[in-house]
Structures are given as structure tokens and as C-alpha cells.
Image: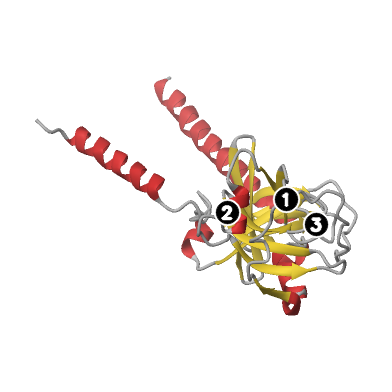
Amino acid sequence: MFHVKHLYSFVLSLLLLLALAAPAYADLVWEPLDNQFFKQHGCSYEDRSYRANGPEGFVTAWDAPDGSVVQAQYQNGEALWVGYTWQGWALINRWEDNKEVSGWVPLAELSLIYDHISFEEEYADQIKDYNGEFADYAGDAAVVNFYEYPGAPEVKHGFETGDVDVLDCLTGASDNPSYISKIFVDENGRTWGYVTYMYGCRNSWFCLDAPDGAGLPVRAVAEPEIVPARTPTLPAKGYTAYILVALVVGATGGILAFFYGKRRKSTK
């Protein structure tokens, strides 16, 4: 006999197979697990990183815009990922002590970290469509390093060419189109290629002339001034929840004491 639990197992197996069959480039859009404000309001997807830059030397993340419960606090300069925004507020998310921490911070207290979007906006007129510039690559690069933007100071993602067919993906070998969609020629005449997605690497640039990126100069970008960091202190309204809990506990204790005393008198 076919039991309900068998049907349940079959459905789960089917869903797993469908997930495995989905295209590798289909990233899941993150949503906070328990933020009630997010669930009840239409928020705009952001997916960019910022630095804490509050006027007091730190930022406070609340349960909701203009909320009353403090979710977390961070000193200025700390990198924070913003998943969503809503009317001048940013929903930040971190994974701390094996649990998700999310909270709302005023956008005015965050400074955007220069990223691939910043670069594309700054050099829009110099970014062109890819036209096979890497198709004839015959080098023997052992690794291909990708960066957030041409000349970024740190490698964002690296591939060893002996482990995956990364060079085939980029050159467009075997009659498959190249993963490169845009190119940019920098001030030194080096050509860079932009890849939207490849083997988990998203929105990144690599140098067509030197795929390993070794010895390339770092691009100077404009960074906002960060207010000196200070140890966070709990805002006045952040105590509200604790005060309410204390009042409830005190009132409950008083009621119990009243009835307990009254009961003792009635039993004498």
C-alpha cells in the first residue's frame, strides 16, 4: 500500500532533482528569515556592500525602520552587506555565531564600497561589447583571476586552468559562445573582459592580456571619508524593550505575591 509518507519522500526527491537540473547560473535571491517588516512591505533588492559610517562612530541595526528593538551594532569601517532597501533604510545581513542577524540601518549612515556597478557607471562610455578579443588566446596561464573591477586590489575569484575548462569557457572553444560579454581597455592599453556568471563567479573582470593578473597596477578609486570608529553604546530608545520586560516581570511578581499572601491569610 502506498502510504502518505512515501508520497512525501517522492515529492522531496522530485524537488531535489529539479533543483539539481536548474541552470548553474540561476542564483537564489536571499530573503531574511524572520524580519517581519520585510515580509509586510515592498522592498527594493540591493545586493551591494557598504561600510558602517555613522556620525557617532558606529551604526545601530533595528528590527524595523524607526524600530525600537536593537538587532546589532557595528563600528564604523566594518563592511556590511545590504540585501534590500526601503525609503532611505538598508536591510543589512550577517551570519554570526551560527545564526542569521539582520536589521535596518539608515542608508545615510552607510558608505558604498566601490564595486563593479560603481566602475560601470564611471566608465560607461569606455565599456564595449565583446567581439571575440579572447577567442585566439594561446597562452598557458595556470590560473585565471577575476576582480571586482579592472585594477581592484584583491582577487575576487580564482580558477586553476587544469581543474576546470575555464579557458574554453572564456575563449568560446568547441563552438560554445564565450562567457565574456563586455570589454574595457585601461589606461595602459590592457584589455579586460567582464563575465556575468561562470562556475559561481559573478559580475567580475579579468585581464585578457594577463589572465593571472600578476603585477597589474591597482586602480585608484574615490572612497568616502569614514568617521573615526567608536565602541557602540545602546541608544536611549533601545532600552524600551528591556524596560517593558522589567515592568511586566515586576507586575507579574506583584500580582503573584498579592494572591499568594491573600491565600495564606485565608488558610490561617
Kind of residue indicated by mark 2: Cys
Tell me the colour scheme of the image: secondary structure
**Observer-nearest of 168 and 79:** 168
Closest to the camera, between mark 2 and mark 3, is 2
Quarter of the picture containing the C terminus is top left
Q: In the picture, residue 171 is in which quadrant?
A: bottom right
Q: CA distance from mark 2 to mark 1?
A: 15 Å
The reply to whether callout 2 and callout 3 are in contact (CB within 8 Å) is no
Question: Neighbour class for label 1 at 10 Å: few (<14), some, many (≥20)?
Answer: few
Q: CA distance from mark 1 to mark 3?
A: 23 Å
Residue 111 in sight here: no
> Helix, strand, or loop for circle 2?
helix
Residue 161 in sight here: yes
| Mark found first going from the N terminus, 2 or 3 | 3
> Which residue, given by chain and number where applicable, does mark 1 sit on?
139
> Which residue, given by chain and number where applicable, does mark 3 sit on?
152
> Helix, strand, or loop for circle 3?
loop
Kind of residue indicated by mark 3: Ala
Residue in the image at 73% along x and 59% along y: 208
Kind of residue indicated by mark 1: Gly
Quarter of the picture containing the N terminus is top left
- Label at residue 169: 2
> Helix, strand, or loop for circle 1?
loop
**Observer-nearest of 195 and 45:** 195
Closest to the camera, between mark 2 and mark 1, is 1
Number of on-image labels: 3
The reply to whether callout 2 and callout 1 are in contact (CB within 8 Å) is no
Residue in the image at 67% along x and 63% along y: 194
Tell whether 240 sits left or right of 41.
right
Q: CA distance from mark 2 to mark 3?
A: 23 Å
